[in-house]
Image (cartoon, rainbow, N blue to C red):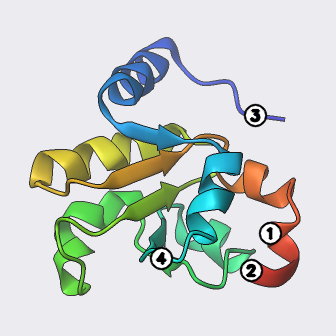
Amino acid sequence: MGKKHSPLFLRRVEHSRSIINECNIDEFILMMNDNESLHIIDVRENHEFESGHMKEAIHIGKGVLERDIEKHPFATSDRIVLYCGGGFRSAIAAQSMKEMGYENVYSLWGGWRAILGTDIRKSNL
C-alpha cells in the first residue's frame, strides 16, 4: 500500500512527471535486456536501500544526488534509470538531473514496489 502524500508534494511530482522521461516496469525490463549500456540508481534513503535493492543499483540518495552524481563516471549522455519506492521521489530526482544536463535519464514509475512484483527480483536482488 502506498503512502498518503500531501497535495503540494503530489503537485510537485506531477509537474516533474510531465517534463521527464519515465518508464514503467515492462519498459525497464526491456532496457535491462537490450544490450545497451544502462546505469541504475536507487535514490531511496539509506535504511530503504539496506533493506533490499537491485544488485546492479548504485545508491545515491535523493537528498545528495545533485552533490554526489559527478563522483560517479557517468557521461551526461548515458542512459540512467532512477528508482525509489514508488516513482515519486525518482521523478523529482530525474527532473533535477535533467536540469543539470543529463540527457537520457528515466524515472521508474512504480519504483521498488514494481520491481518486487516481477521476476527480475530473483536474479537482480
- Image height of 110 relative to 46, above or below: above
Return the residue at label 2. 124
Of the two numbered discs 4 and 1 in the rendering, the one whose residue sits closer to the viewer:
1
Mark 3 or 4, nearer chain start? 3
Residue under the image location 18 percent in, 69 percent down: 67
- Image height of 111 relative to 82, above or below: above
Mark 3 or 1, nearer chain start? 3
Amino acid type, mark 2 = Asn
Secondary structure state at the residue bearing disc 3: loop
Return the residue at label 3. 2
Q: Quadrant of residue 121?
A: bottom right
Of the two numbered discs 2 and 3 in the rendering, the one whose residue sits closer to the viewer:
2
Q: Are marks 2 and 1 in contact (CB under 8 Å)?
A: yes
Coordinates of residue 115 in the picture (x, y in percent): 75, 58
Label 2 Cα neighbours within 10 Å, binned few <14 / some 14-19 / many ≥20: few
Return the residue at label 4. 59
Secondary structure state at the residue bearing disc 4: strand
Label 1 Cα neighbours within 10 Å, binned few <14 / some 14-19 / many ≥20: some
Q: Are marks 2 and 3 in contact (CB under 8 Å)?
A: no
Amino acid type, mark 3 = Gly
Can residue 67 be seen from the camera position used here? yes
Q: CA distance from mark 2 to mark 1?
A: 6 Å
Mark 2 or 3, nearer chain start? 3
